[in-house]
Every structure is written in C-alpha cells, then in structure tokens.
Amino acid sequence: MYRVGKEEVERIEKILLSGKFFRYGEGGECEKFEKDWAAYLGTKYARVNTNGTAALYAGLIGLGIGPGDSVIVPSCTYMATPLAVVAAGAIPIVADVDEALTLCPIDTERRIGPHTKAILPVHMVGLPCDMAPLMDLAQRKNLLVLEDACQAVGGGYEGRKLGVIGDAGSFSFNYYKNMTSGEGGAFVTDDEDVFHRGSVAVDCCAFYWSSGKEKEQESFSGLNFRANEIQGAMLNVQLTRIDEMLSLMRRNRAELMEAGKSAGLTSIKYNSPEYDCGSTLGFRFDTEAEAKAFKDTFNEKVGGAFRIVDTGRHNYTEWDPIMRKQGAHHPALDPFKMPANKDIQVEYTMDMCERSLDIARRSVLIAMHPDHTEEKLEAMAEAIEEAGG
C-alpha cells in the first residue's frame, strides 16, 4: 500500500452513514469506478470484483476458456494465475520466463499444442511482458490473450496501458498493489460478449442488473465475487493518485539505475521502462552467490531487496496443487481428471523450467516507493554502490 489518506476516510464515511453499501441502484461508487477505470485504460468495459483471482477467472470465462483447452502461463507468477485456469476447467501449460522475469515469447511458441487456446502473460512486479512478439504469436496461431496485470496496475507498454493490449485484462487492488481497496479486482475488455459472460462469472445475477440484457447465453450459473460500494469509493480516490505515483517511481528508479551502472552492475531486462510502473529496480548477476551477497549487503544498509525465488508461491515449484494435479475439491470437478481434457498431455516436474529458476536465483529486485525522500534515495544509491563494489 502506497498512499491512503483523509480523502478515502471521508468518502467511505459518506457511504457508511448513508447505509448504501450495495453496488446496484444505491451509491453509484462501483459504477463510477468501472466507467472511469475503463476510460483511464482506454477500453470499453470494466467490471470491478472482489480480488485479482476472481478477475482472472472472469477473464477466462468471458473468453470462453474451459474443458478441452490449455492455457500457457509463465513459470514465475503468483499461484493464483494457474489456479484461475484450473478453476475455469482448463489445463495450465507452464513456460519459461526471460531476463525480464516475464513470459518468454520464444518458449511460449515452443509450448503451444493442439489444444492451446490462450496465452496468459503476467506483468510481474510491475514489469511488462514483451507484448509485441506475444501478440504477433497469438495472431499467427489464432490464440486468445488474457493479460494478468494484477501486479502492474496503471503501468504501460509502448504507450498503451497494460491490460488492454490483449483480448481481456485482469487487475488486483489488494493491499500490496499500486492502487488498493484492501482487497479488490477488475477485469476489462473491448468485447461486449466477453464482458457479459465474465460479469456473470463473478456476479451470478449480473444479467438481471444490466438494462434488460437477458440473453440466454448470459444466464448460466455464475458465482458471486461482487464488489461493494466501500471498495468502489476507495478505488475512486486511489485512481486520482496513480499517475503521479508511477511517475515518481520511474524517476526514482532511473536515478538508482545510474548508481548501479557506476557500480558496474547489469540490470534486468526492461520492456518499455518509460511506460511501466517503475515499481521495481532489478539487477542480474552471473551467479546465485553474487546475487545473495548483493541482496544481503543492501538489506543490511537500507532494506527492500529481494529475490522472487525467496517469496514463496511465485515460482512453479511452489504451486503445490498444480504440481500434484489436484484441481478441485471433488474428482468429478477436477480438470486434470475430466474426460474433455484427457488428450492434453502435460507433466509437471521440478526441473521443467530450470532456465526460469536460474534467472530468478540470479536476479535481485529492489522495491520502489513514490514517497522516498532524497535522503532515502541517497542511502539506497550508496548501498547499491557498496553492495555491488
């Protein structure tokens, strides 16, 4: 969480005192956020919901992903990404990441099979995937693209906002994100049919609330991950801050990257650094030992450095339910046991994406913050130069 202040308190207080918590026909906060969020991103439709996992699920259902399909996911992402694929009834296929710690377009193409229907690139820790070759690949292979922008809220790639480059995009607004409502999420798309299907997936009565749009295909048995007006109110305030914060973090990162150059360090690969979130500074080392030594020395001085391999549940080796193919609470609902998926051959092994693990072990990331003072930045620069010396 970066910034929460009096504006949120006042807006939430108004909701509490009015007693209008329900998002439909009451306070209008969720509806306003959906309209403004879509406009901010440059897309037609947005649906706010309870969390990023629900947003991924909505995007998959909206795109028609289900049993009989496989979806390519990166080996380095929070476990919710492959779990959402399984929740939709499909099978996740794990591909390597590259030096940007995001989905590798070359390995993605290698993993495409006869049942592959979609690619799910993840913009990890605010770092965009290289979307141009991924979109070219999707077009050549007639595949759908759902962007997981849960960790990259507000970021962009070559002048376009993340989440609107593919066929649909998903976002998280939990405590750790650039914008927060404590917990929260949203999915977006330009396709009206995708929007309505995804809306029903996360709000079982969505078609009843949508201006009489009661199409038969929209009235399937959905679930309920509906947001409330308190979340909407908080997000409406948070949206007013996002651009300034990202701009500050990009500026701060650029300043610290110069310190890294002075120390002779090699940065991780950045795709479109002038448009991304600026929330992560990264250095890549020749060996894991060097990476660990840098991280430990930096943290002794100022703190905030980490390796993704140490975070837990962000590497495929830690996705326990996926690795053991336990896809549901009941065997009859388990995609790994469904007859429709019997021809999708996949084996999950601890070394299936060893290149990704090697990159993650040798990469050290440093979290940025929009409110870092000049004194803090100077201390960080000194720590980078000392740790890298």
Image (cartoon, rainbow, N blue to C red):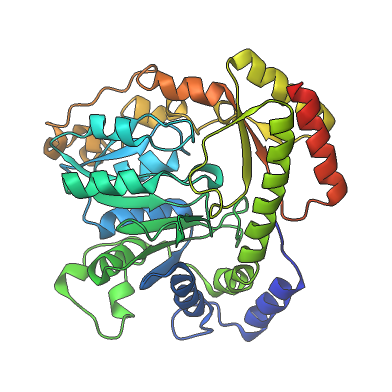
Residue 334 horizontal side relative to residue 155, left or right: left
State which quarter of the image contains the C terminus. Answer: top right
- Quadrant where the N terminus is found in the figure: bottom right
Q: Pinpoint residue 200: horizontal percent, then vertical percent.
A: 30, 66
x 69%, y 57%: residue: 248
Horizontal side, residue 383 vs residue 186: left or right: right
Measured as percent of width and height from the top left, residue 12 is found at 66, 75
Q: Is residue 88 visible?
A: no
Question: x, y percentage for residue 46?
Answer: 40, 69
Q: Count numbered badges in the picture.
A: 0
198 sits left or right of 22 in the view:
left
* Whether residue 44 is situated above or below residue 133 in the rendered picture: below
Q: Is residue 26 above or below residue 264?
A: below
Q: Position of residue 47 (x, y in %)?
A: 40, 68
Location of residue 281 by image quarter: top right
In the displayed image of the protein, which residue is found farthest to the right?
375
**Does 328 appear above or below 183?**
above
- Does 127 sit above or below residue 3? above
Q: Which residue is more in the foreground, 25 or 156?
A: 156
Residue at point 46%, 52% (across, down): 149
Q: Residue at x 33, y 31 (%)?
A: 94
Res. 40 in view: yes
The residue nearer to you, when weighing 69 against 145, is 145
Q: Which residue is drawn at 76% across and 72% down?
A: 6
Foreground pick, 98 / 63: 98
